[in-house]
Image (spheres, helix red, strand yellow):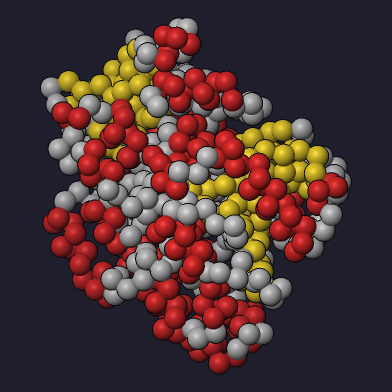
Amino acid sequence: MTTAEFTQQKLTTDHHVMSPVSRTFTLTSETSDTRPKALVIGAGFGGLASAIRLSARGYQVEIIEKLDAPGGRAYVHRQDGFTFDAGPTIITAPFLLEELWQLCGKKMSDHVTLKEMSPFYRIRFYNGQTFDYCGDTDAMSKEIAKFDANDIPGYIKLMQAADKCKHLGFEQMGDVAFDGYKDLLKALPAFAKMKAWNSLYSLVASHIKHPLLRVAFSFHPLLIGGNPFSVTCAYSLIHSLEKTWGVHSAMGGTGAIVNGLVDLLHGLGVKIRYNSPVQKILIENGKACGVQLEDLSSSAASRSLGQSGEQIKSDLVVCNTDSAWTYKYLIAPEHRKHWKDSRIDRGHYSMGLFVWYFGTNRTYTDIPHHMMILTERYKGLLTDIFKKHHLAKDFSLYLHRPTATDSSLAPDGCDTFYALAPVPNLDSKTDWAQQGESFRQSIQEYLESTVLKDLGKHIVTSKITTPLDFQNRLYSYKGAGFGLEPLLTQSAVFRPHNRSEDIPGLFMVGASTHPGAGVPGVLMSAKALEKVIPHAKTLR
């Protein structure tokens, strides 16, 4: 299916309600602005953060966004009076957001209110036992003792290992743009200290013995698209990030943060163009020099033939888009020596995501803001998802109930939810158009039998997204939720570089480039640009 056909499918099947921030801002005159111009493709967290940092470095910045509103994977759906955050809901390392406000001479607290979660989330196992995960050592020791007090010393050692990985992997390397093998050589001592060749699960198992506690302390890489049995143990740093800076939720939902960043860009005079899918990245004399848009004003027949639209020229291009999709579909093969189709196709990609958004006409006050509901199978289910690409009948869920913290996200007396199930990406050949509703029904029945009694009687609004939506709407290769899986061999210098290996003037940010997925990783990718993009004054 061509890019134009994907766009046409989106126009005919996507019936979300437009966000009130769906607008275009511009305060500067393009004819009189002599600053070098940077084009940013995509208004997700990475694109918005990059635009702010580029503006601070003296660039005239314009953002090109395919959707009708900002956010990307953090888009906001509004339906029947309910507000649904489309994707990221857990905020850690909030200082990375605060930095963006500081660059604009402002304070984040004047625009966004973050509330720390306590507990961070509740884990419910298949046998009904629960574990309230938090950052307090004493509280965690009490939770561990419910299963096996003998694992408390192992927990302490695990957190020490996580602290080391946070220092070496996040603080020292998170904003390093791995530009070549010299950068890798410099990082090798840190990788050795972390024993990064070991899997995250093996690290946890070396300290924790109870099988359910091993699950509780190893599932975290799923939050960034990785299989705990395959990804490097360096990702234990997630434990330390949460323990050090807490887990936060934004009042008004994650979309409130997106709106705050858009307001910052408004103040900087940055132009954001919505409903503007990019057809290709323009390359002249071997250098990225702008984009060509799809022609959405033409007829459907013309669009299906890939009719071209407006060209926008710039001095450099920053892609907050899926890297695999960008290289494969937006850049002609003759410009790609590193990211050839064969290399893209043989990559190992993250799982897909099935998300069911629903609202109820009653509240479930015993359900916390964040809850993990786990099936009996752990390694077997993950093998089905990541290795076999098989859609199993069982599933584990992340249940998100933001109205536990902010009742404004639903009508009075109601609750807003989403239930997210990791599923295989589109390599599974699952026909989601046919199977989506039956899979949703299975999730509903499972929730009714476990934590949401009589759910079916109280649902008043419902919406699903599948890996097919990630492909068609977000242009995510294979419908993967997080791009390349964060394996050691697909991390750092082995991940698509922040500065393109193939094309001068082309840069990458977001989940599918270094350092990886998750809000902290995406924000750090924008920070890494400062290591490889020159200050605008050097280009004048």
Residue pictured at 32% horizontal, 73% vertical? 198
Is residue 354 found left or right of 4 in the rendered image?
A: right
- Specify the quadrant that holds the N terminus: top left
Q: Residue at coordinates 59% horizontally, 38% vertically from top-left?
A: 434
Identify which residue is drawn at 28% across, 43% down. Answer: 345
Q: What is the residue that sits farthest to the bottom in this orientation? A: 150
Q: Position of residue 14 (x, y in %)?
A: 59, 27
Is the residue 124 above or below the residue 24 in the image?
A: below
Instruction: Work out whether residue 86 can be spotted.
Output: no
> In this orientation, which residue lies closer to the viewer: 214 or 382?
382
| Residue 316 in picture, x, y percent from top left | 26, 28
* Residue closest to the eye, 31 or 192: 192
Toward which corner of the image does residue 258 lie, by quadrant?
top right
The answer to which of 41 and 209 lies nearer the viewer is: 209
Front in this rendered view, residue 341 or 157: 341
**How many numbered circles are shown?**
0
456 up-or-down from 150: above or below: above
Question: What percent of the width, then of the height, locates residue 132?
Answer: 66, 72
Image quarter (top left, top right, bottom left or bottom right) of the C terminus: top left
Determine if residue 467 is in view: yes
User: Along the horizontal axis of the image, is 126 left or right of 470?
Assistant: right
Describe residue 463's horizontal placement relative to residue 216 as left or right.
right
Residue visible at 64% across and 63% down in the picture:
373
Q: Position of residue 448 (x, y in %)?
A: 77, 57
